[in-house]
Image (spheres, rainbow, N blue to C red):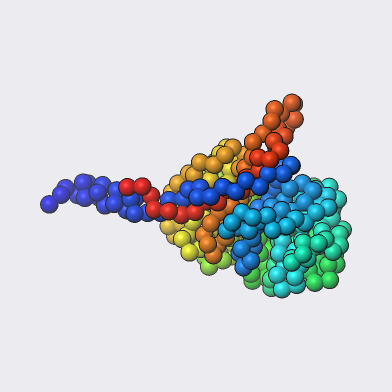
Amino acid sequence: MCRMYLCLTLAAASLWAQSPAYRVIQRHLLGADGSWDYVVPDPPNHRVFLARQNRIMVVDENTGKLLGEVTGIDGAHGTAVAGKTGHGFATEGHGQSVAMFDLKTYRVLSHIPAAEDADAILYDPPSNRVFTLNGDAHSSTVIDPKEGERITSIPLGGKPEYGVSAGDGKVYANLTDISEVVEIDSKSATVTRRWPTAPCKQPVSMAIDTEHHRLFSGCRSGLMAVSDYQAAKIVATIPIGTGVDGAGYDPVYGDAFASNANGSLTVIHQDSPDQYHVSQSVTTPERSRNMGLDPITHRIFVVSAEFGPSAGQSRPPVLAGTFTLLVIGREPAAR
């Protein structure tokens, strides 16, 4: 018969030994020149869209094979997939526009006017609309994904970063300069609510748990803020790495993720809708701050590269031929 504290210690050790851990399980060297931005998986078709300045690389998520490229993009940032229309959309930050392309051939079909600093972009199924998040313009451009036409522009009252569709007629976005979350009615194309993310400052990345009505905002202040988006309030904050730019949530395992520029992927477990703890920090290459999650395979995709001397630039140049897609998966922790 063991003492209570010894029994608890042994039980905890056993649970840790059996609990899954995340680690890098594959590396795919893709090469080519240029920096990158958003990493967008397309789970039904087992591919990943990677923004590379003047093009979108399309990669088979299982093999790392380059399937094709969407070329002629004037400042590539985000990608949105509107599968039932057969069209994809890529924001052109320099061109202040959106390129609509064919999801089978990857051929650009048109360039749709958006606004200054067209950055993140998402598809909202209930309204069958595409929403851009235009950072410097403090707005969202709404697009008809079938005809490829601009419907309207929504003033947001702050600089938007990433956003998500809740699948119920609402779209949410972080406003990084004023540290708020904004709610958009996707059918009326109007802002309906907003709330502060304090003490989480400069929210950028975003993920969603639709079952429990929770939003996860990764903040540059080193926190992830969890919002109850029905109540429009923050219910928890959790420490993450520095320089976050990507987020994800896996509803099967109840894990949220923050990919950070300091060389870490923070894994946060959901104990309950309002209770969370950091369960792991996965080591990644420095500046691997963008991520995408495939909720079907439960794999996380981050990108990395080697860099040359900064030569006074704010961002050092990517060394040609070093761009790599990393696949992170769940495996049993070592005993």
- Report the label total: 0
The image position of residue 117, as x and y in percent, is: 80, 49
The image position of residue 96, as x and y in percent, is: 85, 52
The image position of residue 222, as x and y in percent, is: 57, 41
Could you tell me if residue 40 is visible in this image? no
Looking at the image, which residue is at 62% across and 42% down?
Answer: 304
Q: Is residue 312 placed above or below 15 in the rendered structure?
A: above
Looking at the image, which residue is at 74% across and 42% down?
Answer: 33
Left or right, 10 with reference to 224: left
Could you tell me if residue 223 is visible in this image? yes
The image position of residue 280, as x and y in percent, is: 45, 46
Left or right, 68 with reference to 95: left
Give the quadrant of residue 60.
bottom right
Seen from the viewer's position, the closer of residues 304 and 121 is: 304
Left or right, 201 with reference to 265: right
Looking at the image, which residue is at 73% across and 57% down?
Answer: 68
Looking at the image, which residue is at 64% across and 69% down?
Answer: 167
Residue furthest to the top in view is 311
Q: Is residue 45 placed above or below 30 in the rendered structure?
A: below
